[in-house]
Amino acid sequence: MLIQARNKTWHNKLLKCKNEDERNKLMLRSGEESCRQMMNTKTFEEFWVPAIGQFSVRGIKEADEFEYKTMKEASEKGLELRKEVEQA
């Protein structure tokens, strides 16, 4: 899973994780957010991405690009991804 921390504090905590299990636990205890609004800096268009707490989920693999036009779509995907992480 390709994730992006919301800020430097969470990024530093992520760097300390030694494996995927530690990373998943960190994401799950970082909050309840299921999506986040972002902006394309080239086109200045706003879009939504799924999130698990303080971490935006940009895709499952490199070719993915999770960008949604509505908050509802991104939130649904975020909740789906959270369930997958909880089961892992």
Image (cartoon, rainbow, N blue to C red):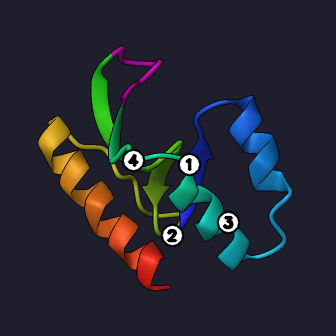
Sequence-first disc among 2 and 4: 4
| Sequence order check, earlier mark of 3 and 4 | 3
Residue located beneath label 4 in the image? 32
From the image, tell me which residue sits under label 2.
61
> Tag 3, which secondary structure?
helix
Q: Residue at x 36, y 14 (%)?
A: 44
Residue receiving disc 1: 30
Asked if residue 41 is among those painted magenta in the image, a careful observer would answer yes
Question: SS class of the residue under badge 1?
Answer: loop
Q: Which residue is mark 3?
A: 23
Question: How far is the residue under mark 2 from the one under mark 3?
Answer: 16 Å
Alpha carbon separation for disc pair 1 and 2: 22 Å
Q: Is residue 36 magenta?
A: no
Task: Give the residues in magenta.
Answer: 37-44
Tag 4 secondary structure:
loop
* Amino acid on which the number 3 mark rests in the picture: Arg
Q: Amino acid at mark 4?
A: Glu
Residue pictured at 80% horizontal, 64% vertical: 17
